[in-house]
């Protein structure tokens, strides 16, 4: 029965491809790239996938080839483990488990394709360069085998996390596709915003949250869900056989929560209210949170956040507020987290600090700051004591950070201290003026550090000089 869904989908894809090819380069129906993905989730933790990507060249330069990053391939047993050594026990609580990505076919109006197992990059060559404004469709079929893990992607006793599971177009930065080897440190996903339509079968008795708005239907006795989202950074889907979904609405935004806590929907509303007021209105019409076993505190995806289910109290609220702040800084305003993780993480940490100030829990906002100061200074002391002075430079390749500990202290703690320093020096109003412009100007785009500096300078001349000193400090 499940196979049948896929075969119907395949016929539909081929027909659609022919139609799209017939009119491609002539019409501009879709303003931006759109992914259509069909998932057949099997009981053995494999997923049969069909994917159609309607790519619009809105990059401002001709494209000779397309590059997709296949993050799921990083979990293959022939690769290094996709987690830092010190977190291996939490990442694989029941022992090491591998995933697999099996590419079956890539087709469409393409010259050829090549999947490089080492780099996880699928390169699709075109017959002729795709000019600015033109459109092309690429179809592919693949099977993923999910690893058993408490990481971002895979399954565990609470359910299935489908994030970064599909071949995702690399971000296009400064005239080329940007990618790096999969990093166990930091957040490895980096992409341009796109539209999504994802259809999947919901196993009997399970519940889910996903990016975007979803509709439920039935086909051959199975529950079929279709979720649609516009201009999101990436698509995520969390499914659980035990957790239940609760929903609410706030200021036109549909909120959904998969988990067992009672205050999460309230924290979600508060976050939308605070950040909307400080930075500009939330860019989407849905927001979802799922509590899952998770190796870190939480993780952000397009209009969806995963929170470590073991957290409680104000720490839980902090992580919810942090991940939702990422919907402004990561989701809407993208930045190159593979080399400038401080850009969204630091700003997100500062936004979380402002969240607690604005909801009246000033004690907790002070605690966040004092924690950042004490942890960062302890980190510096430890580095000095072992004769390896810490470099304070904020940027750098994720893979070049020596440890999660080092990465966290630089990317989160030092960055938060920097933002608080800027607030104290420039004044909160000036800073928020700059951030409002940053949000309005770079929403659905990828902002460079220079773009951020320019917004600071627009708010107060030479303000960026202060930040640059912190960023470059060695
Ligand atoms: Zn974060």
Image (cartoon, rainbow, N blue to C red):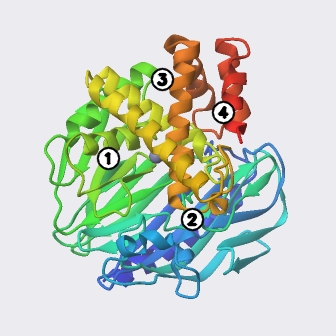
Q: In front here: 185 or 1?
A: 185
Which label lies toward us, 1 or 3? 3
Residue 82 in view (yes/no): yes
- Residue denoted by label 2: 52
Q: Quadrant of residue 202?
A: bottom left
Label 4, label 1: how far apart the Cα atoms are: 34 Å
Which label lies toward us, 4 or 1? 4
- Residue at the spot x=27%, y=44% of the render? 315
Crowd band around label 1 with a 10 angstrom C-alpha radius: few (<14), some (14–19), many (20+): many
- Residue denoted by label 1: 288
The mark that comes first in sequence, 1 or 3, is: 3
The mark that comes first in sequence, 3 or 4, is: 3
- Residue denoted by label 4: 470
Query: Where does residue 220 sit, x and y in percent of width and height?
Result: 25, 75
Q: In front here: 386 or 222?
A: 386
Q: Is mark 2 on a helix, strand or loop?
A: strand
Label 2, label 4: how far apart the Cα atoms are: 43 Å
Quadrant of the image for the C terminus?
top right
Q: In which quarter of the image is residue 66?
A: bottom right
Label 3, label 2: how far apart the Cα atoms are: 35 Å
Q: Would residue 50 be found to the left or right of residue 272 on screen?
A: right
Q: Would residue 128 be found to the left or right of residue 403 on screen?
A: right
């Amino acid at each position: 029965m499940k196979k049948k869904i896929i075969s119907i989908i395949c016929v539909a894809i081929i027909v659609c491809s022919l139609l799209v090819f017939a009119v491609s380069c002539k019409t501009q129906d879709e303003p931006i790239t759109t992914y259509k993905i069909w998932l057949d989730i099997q009981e053995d933790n494999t997923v049969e996938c069909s994917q159609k990507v309607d790519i619009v060249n809105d990059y401002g330069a001709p494209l000779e080839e397309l590059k997709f990053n296949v993050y799921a391939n990083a979990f293959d047993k022939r690769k290094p483990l996709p987690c830092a050594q010190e977190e291996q026990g939490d990442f694989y609580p029941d022992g090491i488990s591998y995933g697999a990505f099996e590419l079956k076919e890539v087709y469409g109006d393409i010259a050829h394709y090549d999947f490089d197992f080492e780099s996880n990059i699928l390169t699709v060559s075109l017959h002729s360069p795709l000019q600015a404004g033109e459109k092309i469709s690429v179809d592919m079929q693949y099977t993923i085998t999910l690893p058993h893990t408490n990481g971002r992607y895979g399954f565990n006793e609470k359910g299935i996390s489908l994030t970064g599971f599909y071949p995702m177009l690399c971000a296009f930065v400064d005239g080329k596709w940007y990618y790096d080897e999969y990093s166990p440190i930091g957040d490895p996903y980096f992409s341009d915003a796109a539209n999504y339509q994802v259809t999947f079968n919901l196993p009997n008795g399970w519940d889910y949250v996903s990016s975007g708005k979803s509709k439920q239907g039935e086909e051959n006795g199975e529950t079929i869900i279709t979720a649609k989202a516009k201009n999101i950074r990436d698509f995520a889907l969390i499914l659980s056989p035990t957790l239940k979904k609760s929903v609410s609405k706030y200021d036109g935004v549909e909120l959904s929560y998969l988990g067992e806590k009672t205050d999460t929907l309230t924290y979600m509303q508060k976050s939308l209210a605070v950040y909307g007021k400080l930075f500009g209105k939330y860019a989407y019409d849905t927001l979802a949170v799922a509590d899952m076993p998770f190796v870190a505190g939480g993780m952000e995806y397009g209009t969806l956040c995963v929170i470590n289910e073991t957290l409680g109290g104000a720490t839980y609220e902090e992580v919810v507020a942090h991940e939702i702040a990422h919907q402004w800084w990561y989701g809407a305003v993208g930045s190159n987290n593979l080399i400038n993780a401080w850009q969204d993480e630091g700003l997100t940490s500062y936004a979380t600090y402002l969240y607690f100030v604005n909801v009246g829990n000033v004690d907790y906002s002070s605690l966040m700051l004092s924690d950042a100061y004490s942890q960062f200074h302890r980190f510096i002391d430890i580095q000095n004591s072992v004769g390896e002075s810490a470099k304070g430079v904020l940027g750098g390749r994720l893979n070049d950070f020596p440890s999660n500990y080092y990465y966290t202290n630089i990317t989160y703690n030092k960055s938060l201290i920097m933002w608080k320093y800027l607030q104290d020096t420039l004044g909160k109003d000036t800073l928020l003026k700059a951030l409002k412009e940053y949000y309005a100007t770079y929403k659905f785009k990828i902002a460079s550090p220079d773009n951020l500096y320019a917004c600071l300078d627009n708010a107060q001349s030479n303000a960026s000089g202060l930040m640059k000193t912190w960023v470059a400090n060695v």
